[in-house]
């Protein structure tokens, strides 16, 4: 999480290990970017939640997730995701 934090200025929310308060979700849900080919939905949520206040990171929390995308579609994970991330930085 260190590298995205440098570019974003705050901790990113990442799919399998994030939680958003219902009150925050209700404030941001209509502002979210919906084009799945242009955004990472969890990173987009991060930008919008950050406008409401601080994003907390609990380094003790462990969330298991699959590495299928890295294993079977490495270009998608290391290429497309990285390109999409930097495009999102420009628009947010």
Image: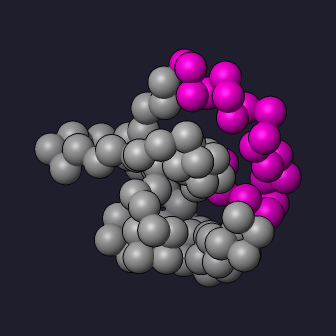
Residue plotted at (42% across, 38% down) = 18
Residue plotted at (84% across, 52% down) = 35
Look at the magenta stretch and give its main secondary structure.
loop
Taking the view exactly as shown, the residue that stands out farthest to the right is: 35
Residue 27 in view (yes/no) = yes
Quarter of the picture holding the C terminus: bottom right
Which quadrant of the figure has residue 60? top left
Tally of numbered discs: 0
Residue 64 in view (yes/no) = no
Look at the picture and state if 45 lies above or below 39. above
Taking the view exactly as shown, the residue that stands out farthest to the left is: 60
Residue 34 colored in magenta in the image? yes
Q: Where is residue 76 in the image (x, y as percent from the top left)?
A: 64, 71
Which quadrant of the figure has residue 25? top right
**Horizontal placement of 67 versus 77: left or right?**
left
Residue 60 colored in magenta in the image? no
Quarter of the picture holding the N terminus: bottom left
Residue plotted at (53% across, 49% down) = 50
Residue range of the region highlighted in magenta in the rendering: 22-41
**Horizontal placement of 72 versus 58: left or right?**
right
Q: Where is residue 91 in the image (x, y as percent from the top left)?
A: 76, 69
Look at the picture and state if 58 lies above or below 67. above
Judge by depth and name the residue closer to the eye, 8 or 86.
8
Judge by depth and name the residue closer to the eye, 55 or 38.
55
**Horizontal placement of 72 versus 11: left or right?**
right
Q: Position of residue 15 (x, y in %)?
A: 49, 44
Which quadrant of the figure has residue 38? bottom right
């Amino acid at each position: 999480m260190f590298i995205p934090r440098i570019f974003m200025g705050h901790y990113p929310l990442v799919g399998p290990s994030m939680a958003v308060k219902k009150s925050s979700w209700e404030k941001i849900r209509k502002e979210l970017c919906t084009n799945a080919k242009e955004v990472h939905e969890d990173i987009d949520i991060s930008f919008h939640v950050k406008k409401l206040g601080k994003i907390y990171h609990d380094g003790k929390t462990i969330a298991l997730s699959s590495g299928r995308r890295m294993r079977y579609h490495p270009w998608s994970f290391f290429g497309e995701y990285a390109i999409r991330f930097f495009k999102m930085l420009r628009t947010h």
